[in-house]
Image: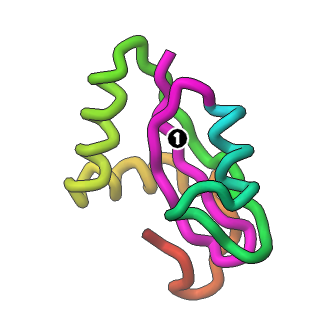
Amino acid sequence: MWILYLIQHSKTKELYMGVTNDLKKRLIIHNRGKSKYTKRIDGEWILIYAEAYRSKFDAFKRESRLKQHGNAKRELKKRIVKSFLEVKSGAGQA
């Protein structure tokens, strides 16, 4: 099973989206600072949203669509607005 996931940093409120076939392991990697794009000094990455796919191709296609098409990303954010960590005015919204 392939998982498209959205995580948010507890301190900076930054968002990060990715795809993995082992979500538990991937979150550990993000929180241990082993990922180049999510390395932070303090705080932790918290899972906000996930979608499961049987096909790796479909998962990466969905990730690409969300990252490249503003409308798809806006619609997802509207759907899950209550799932985000509290954000202070303008900080950390990707």
Residue 39 higher or lower than 21, as above or below: below
Residue 13 higher or lower than 89, as above or below: above
- Closer to us: 40 or 94: 40
What residue would you read off at disc 1?
5
Neighbour tally class for label 1: few under 14, some 14-19, many 20 plus, Cα within 10 Å = many
The type of colouring in the image is rainbow
The residue that appears at 73% across and 44% down in the rendered structure is 28
- Judge whether residue 3 can be spotted in this image: yes
Is 14 displayed left or right of 59 in the figure? right
The residue that appears at 53% across and 62% down in the rendered structure is 36
Q: Position of residue 20 (x, y in %)?
A: 51, 32
Is 58 displayed left or right of 25 in the figure? left
- Residue 42 colored in magenta in the image: no
Amino acid type, callout 1: Tyr
Numbered disc 1: secondary structure: strand
Q: Position of residue 37 (x, y in %)?
A: 50, 64
- Residue 13 colored in magenta in the image: yes
Residue 92 higher or lower than 68, as above or below: below
Magenta stretch bounds:
1-22
